[in-house]
């Protein structure tokens, strides 16, 4: 080799060594791979499941939107008057326009599948939607579709799936009202994406839709195809009061905005599991480095470069993180399939109606999971790889010097913890409406607490060692052993503490939330019987109660009061969002509703509202955008233009995070026109029986409309069931986080115990029985678990506080009362100690049966 | 090195030494399809109170023989009987308790417990037997006195030199009055002078009380001090000769 030649460096022998080690300690690597896989699986499953719901909605919306560029929509709930459509065609004969009327129905023959019912004018369709516009698709069905009432078309795939043929009837449930429709044809598409978008559609002629949805003189909106800005301007000027022109994508954006906080919360939860996973990866890689320090020393003596060692460690990490991440992707898809139902249910309960039958595999979601899994592993491996690189080329450096180095670092850990916690607090105090700084602050607090662990473990174990100095040898050994292996034990305690604090924090948050909701329901729902059409959503009613039923209820003598509610979506220009306006005819709380704020010098806000002096708003309406600055007035878009209303009070509303405002039904009718009644609250006259009344109403109205008639108790119970259903996904995520943590703790403690095989063998040779050794192992891990559990309690409380007072407020605009119950804390201690003890069982059994002479030969 | 006077035993004395019988003792390991023999059909009778040296090259099977006698390894075939107790017939628990109460081990690499102080390392066997530290403190200190380390009782092992650590290991091995002492290359990790001092101490403490001492070594010079020398070669006990000490006696 000439001096100019680059030195020959081969990593092949190093890789052979790595492979041998992998074969000798497969369990250690398997657990690490499992930890990464679980973390990635959580991330991917959440992303796939919520993405699938979003995509299903978008596809279904896109199928209806087609090539539409703009829409004319009505501000009043009744929709766009048919006359306005006719007037538009006359005013703009050259602009492509198509009326659309939408609703939802369940079809008995399709296993009660929820269908998106779309009424169109077939002659106007061609420029907008290929599938609907091409009448050739309908084949023989074209004529009856146009000429015969009560006919419809469904997707060919759906028809085939349920054995529906042309001429078959569909029995529909339209918000409790029955209707029968004849299928006269099917639509199909060669594109798989388009087929999915069509799967839930029921296409009707506009007149059929108007009849079914009981809106004979109105359409939902008018689709337009407009390219030129001057035409748009002209249309804008032409628009009569009560109509608004909006871009076609506005609706999809609004839906995305609606669920953004919900999705971000789920993602943050899954990232939390990844953080626990990062601890685990760091642990495993650190262990593999510490265990091989002597080997690295020898290799350095033999001429292995620092760079080679660094790339060896990172290469190993990259390899097992790749395997773990790929496994995680597969697990994530499986898990996503299981949780998509939970997520879809919550989206249906709170946001929009969507039906997802399968998850759509998004390449981006999978790539993201792979990227996060691998990046986390490489990041976590960088520090131990650096340490391996710094191994001096000699054998003299012993474990004791490594641990000595760690002890010298303790003050720096304190400093780093203080800085990280400080940063977290600053991020949380930052008055931003964005969730990102809030979550970043939360993660910083968790990291800060984890950084506090090495000094805390050192201090506590030193104190315990002193306190136990007079006890038996097993009791004396345990804290000293933990102290001696601080570089590993402190990380294990920190990882367990973070995981358990997440359990405590989320338990407190859910418990507080549930407690708050129970109290809120108790105070708000005072009527004895509630009547509404059956609905697919939990927080608003789609459909109206038959006016004759409403009238009949008003005339009953056995009721002391009848309260009516209707919900209308209204736009708030100042906030650039739509909220739910409840037109209230009476107070369902009977005056017991608690208020978060009442305008000063105003006695009874409800009375003031009934006197048309303003509106009452929910916290969610302004908290996210304005923080705690309560608006004096509220501008609302009405058919007559934007009107400003005084804000009379702020009420608690945990049924919606988009914001709700209460307005007197009379004033709403005056401004938005007649709407209807979405639900009724009935107060039974003294001496009456609510259960009997509900039963009687059910039987007497069943032939007119299939109504949901619930007693107060049943409604509260149903509300809490929805609450529990909403948090089922959180519970599942929490469980998975525990699983990730457990795998981490198990592998850490196991490695810790197994690497001390020689020391334990000496104890065994000196006469320690397997039982005594088992006690020592359990005591050590129990102490670590106990410390993690104890530290997780205050950290869990802090986590809950941030979740309740910062994250919840910024995500959903809800303020909750924190309710602390002792069981949140002792359960966490039990979980921590239990997980630690369980993790010690295998090493204890294995060490007990290890051949002493073999273990003694280990160097 | 002058030795401090021996203190009286802490408990009512049991027989200070035990006779040892090995019958057809073999040990092999399976390596793939092949069997690797470490010891082959060893038969031996050792009277109580003898000092026996096992000579042999590295890998000859000396340590394995010691481990089998001490019950920290199990033979493939054969029996080990110490003081009338056939320890190869005992279960793991009973064997451990026998070892704890009757046998003392000294290793080449000292093998002190790093998280226990010098004194605690010496009280360890007694504490494992359920006796209190307070009760064991006096005899342990006396033993440390005899190995010349009473002033280092509170120190941690990593603060001691190799020779000092091995003296602590000797104290630990002897403190519970074992009937048999097994030493595996006790001077192998020490310099010549320190090794000589440690050996002197070990022989003095065992011979004075007539304990049975079996020492594995490849230092032939030590053999001259023994009652009997056994040579282990490729798993066989191939040579046996009386030593100068035995002849003198």
Image (cartoon, grey):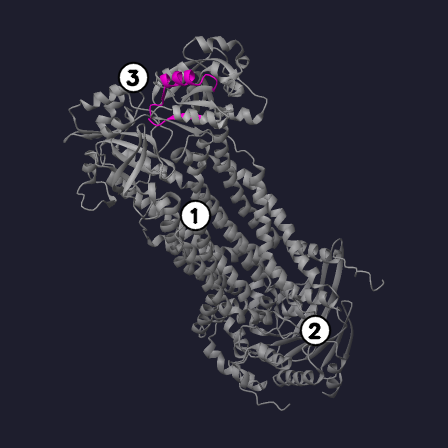
> In front: A472, or A682?
A682
| Subunit bearing disc 2 | B
A516 w.r.t. B76: above or below: above
Figure quadrant of residue B111: bottom right
Q: What stretch is highlighted in magenta?
A: A71-95
* Rendered image: mark on residue A703: 3
- Is residue A529 magenta-colored? no
> In front: A49, or A351?
A351
* Rendered image: mark on residue B45: 2
Which residue is painted at 43% across and 73% down in the image? Answer: A467
Secondary structure under tag 2 reads strand
The picture places residue B71, in percent across and down from the top left corner, at 63, 67
Tag 1 residue: A435
Q: Between disc 1 and disc 3, whose residue precedes? A: 1
Q: Which of marks 1 and 3 is in front?
A: 1
Bin the neighbour count of mark 2 within 10 Å (Cα to Cα): few under 14, some 14-19, many 20 and up: few
Inter-mark Cα distance, 1 to 3: 50 Å
């Amino acid at each position: 080799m000439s001096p100019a030649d680059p030195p020959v460096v081969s990593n092949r022998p190093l890789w052979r060594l790595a492979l041998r080690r992998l074969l000798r300690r497969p369990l250690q690597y398997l657990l690490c791979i499992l930890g990464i896989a679980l973390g990635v699986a959580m991330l991917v499953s959440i992303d796939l499941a919520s993405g699938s719901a979003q995509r299903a909605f978008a596809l279904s919306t896109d199928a209806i939107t087609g090539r539409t560029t703009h829409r004319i929509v009505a501000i009043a709930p009744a929709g766009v008057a048919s006359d306005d459509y006719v007037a538009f065609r006359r005013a703009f004969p050259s602009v492509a326009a198509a009326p659309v009327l939408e609703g939802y129905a369940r079809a008995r023959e399709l296993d009660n599948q929820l269908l998106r019912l779309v009424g169109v004018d077939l002659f106007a369709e061609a420029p907008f939607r290929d599938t609907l516009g091409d009448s050739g698709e309908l084949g023989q069905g074209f004529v009856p579709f146009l000429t015969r009432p009560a006919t419809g078309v469904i997707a060919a795939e759906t028809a085939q799936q349920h054995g529906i043929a042309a001429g078959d009837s569909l029995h529909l449930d339209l918000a409790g009202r029955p209707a029968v429709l004849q299928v006269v044809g099917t639509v199909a598409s060669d594109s798989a994406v388009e087929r999915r978008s069509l799967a839930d559609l029921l296409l009707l002629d506009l007149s059929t839709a108007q009849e079914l949805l009981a809106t004979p003189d109105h359409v939902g909106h008018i689709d337009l195809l407009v390219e030129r800005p001057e035409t748009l301007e002209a249309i804008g000027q032409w628009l009569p009061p009560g109509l608004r022109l909006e871009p076609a994508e506005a609706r999809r954006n609004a839906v995305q905005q609606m669920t953004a906080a919900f999705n971000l919360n789920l993602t943050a939860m899954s990232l939390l599991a990844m953080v626990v996973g990062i601890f685990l990866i760091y642990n495993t890689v650190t262990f593999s480095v510490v265990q091989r320090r002597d080997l690295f020393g020898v290799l350095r003596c033999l001429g292995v470069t620092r760079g080679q060692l660094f790339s060896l460690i990172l290469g190993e990490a990259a390899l097992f993180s790749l395997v773990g991440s790929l496994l995680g992707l597969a697990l994530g898809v499986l898990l996503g399939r299981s949780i998509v139902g939970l997520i879809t249910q919550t989206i249906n309960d709170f946001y929009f109606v969507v039906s997802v039958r399968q998850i759509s595999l998004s390449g981006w979601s999978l790539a993201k999971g792979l990227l996060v899994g691998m990046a986390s592993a490489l990041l976590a491996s960088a520090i131990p790889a650096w340490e391996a690189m710094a191994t001096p080329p000699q054998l003299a450096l012993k474990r004791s010097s490594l641990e000595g180095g760690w002890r010298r670092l303790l003050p720096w850990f304190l400093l780093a913890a203080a800085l990280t916690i400080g940063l977290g607090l600053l991020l949380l105090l930052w008055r931003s409406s964005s969730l990102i700084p809030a979550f970043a602050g939360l993660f910083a607090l968790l990291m800060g607490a984890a950084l506090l662990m090495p000094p805390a473990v050192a201090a506590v174990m030193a104190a315990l060692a002193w306190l136990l100095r007079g006890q038996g040898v097993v009791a004396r050994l345990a804290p000293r052993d933990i102290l001696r292996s601080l570089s590993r034990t402190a990380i294990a305690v920190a990882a367990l503490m973070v995981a358990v604090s997440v359990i405590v924090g989320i338990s407190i948050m859910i418990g507080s939330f549930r407690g708050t909701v129970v109290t809120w329901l108790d105070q708000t729902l005072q009527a004895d019987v509630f009547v509404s059409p059956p609905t697919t959503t939990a927080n608003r009613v789609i459909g109206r109660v038959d006016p004759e039923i409403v009238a009949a209820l008003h005339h009953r003598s056995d009721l002391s009061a009848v309260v009516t509610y209707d919900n209308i979506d209204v736009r708030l220009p100042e906030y650039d969002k739509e909220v739910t306006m409840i037109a209230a005819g009476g107070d369902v709380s009977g005056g017991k509703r608690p208020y978060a704020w009442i305008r000063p010098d105003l006695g009874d806000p409800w009375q003031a509202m009934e006197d048309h002096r303003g509106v009452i708003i929910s916290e969610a309406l302004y908290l996210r955008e304005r923080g705690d600055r309560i608006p004096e007035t509220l501008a609302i878009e009405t058919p007559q233009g934007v009107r400003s209303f005084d804000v009379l009070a702020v009420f608690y509303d945990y049924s919606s995070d988009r914001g709700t405002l209460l307005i007197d039904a009379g004033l709403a009718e005056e401004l938005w026109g007649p709407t209807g009644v979405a639900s009724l609250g009935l107060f039974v006259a003294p001496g009456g029986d609510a259960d009997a009344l509900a039963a009687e109403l059910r039987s007497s109205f069943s032939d007119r409309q299939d109504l949901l008639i619930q007693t107060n108790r049943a409604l509260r119970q149903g509300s809490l069931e929805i609450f529990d259903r909403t948090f089922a996904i959180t519970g599942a995520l929490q469980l998975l986080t525990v699983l990730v943590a457990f795998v981490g703790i198990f592998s850490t403690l196991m490695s810790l115990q197994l690497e001390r095989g020689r020391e334990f063998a000496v104890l065994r040779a000196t006469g320690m029985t397997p039982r005594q050794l088992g006690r020592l192992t359990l005591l050590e891990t129990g102490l670590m678990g106990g410390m993690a559990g104890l530290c997780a309690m205050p950290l869990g409380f802090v986590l809950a506080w941030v979740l309740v007072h910062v994250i919840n407020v910024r995500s959903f605009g809800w303020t909750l009362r924190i309710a602390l119950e002792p069981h949140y804390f002792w359960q966490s201690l039990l979980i921590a100690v239990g997980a630690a003890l369980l993790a010690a069982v295998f090493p204890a059994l294995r060490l007990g049966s290890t051949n002493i002479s073999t273990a003694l030969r280990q160097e | 090195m002058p030795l401090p006077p021996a203190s009286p035993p802490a408990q009512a004395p049991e027989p200070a030494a035990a006779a040892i019988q090995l019958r057809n003792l073999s040990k092999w390991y399976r390596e793939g399809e092949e069997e690797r023999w470490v010891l082959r059909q060893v038969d031996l009778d050792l009277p109580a109170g003898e000092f026996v040296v096992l000579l042999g090259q590295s890998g000859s099977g000396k340590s394995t023989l010691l481990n089998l006698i001490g019950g920290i390894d199990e033979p493939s075939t054969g029996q080990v009987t110490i003081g009338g107790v056939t320890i190869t017939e005992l279960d793991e628990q009973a064997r451990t308790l026998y070892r704890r109460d009757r046998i003392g081990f000294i290793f080449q690499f000292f093998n002190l417990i790093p998280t226990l102080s010098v004194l605690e390392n010496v009280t360890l066997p007694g504490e494992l037997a359920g006796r209190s530290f307070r009760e064991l403190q006096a005899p342990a200190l006396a033993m440390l006195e005899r190995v010349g380390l009473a002033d280092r009782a509170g120190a941690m092992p990593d603060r001691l030199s190799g020779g000092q650590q091995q003296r602590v290991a000797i104290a630990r091995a002897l403190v519970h009055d074992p009937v048999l002492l097994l030493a595996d290359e006790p001077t192998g990790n020490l310099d010549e002078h320190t090794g000589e001092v440690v050996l002197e101490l070990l022989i003095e403490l065992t011979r004075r009380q007539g304990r049975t001492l079996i020492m594995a070594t490849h230092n032939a010079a030590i053999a001259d001090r023994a009652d009997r020398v056994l040579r282990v070669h490729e798993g066989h006990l191939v040579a046996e000769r009386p030593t100068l000490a035995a002849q003198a006696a």
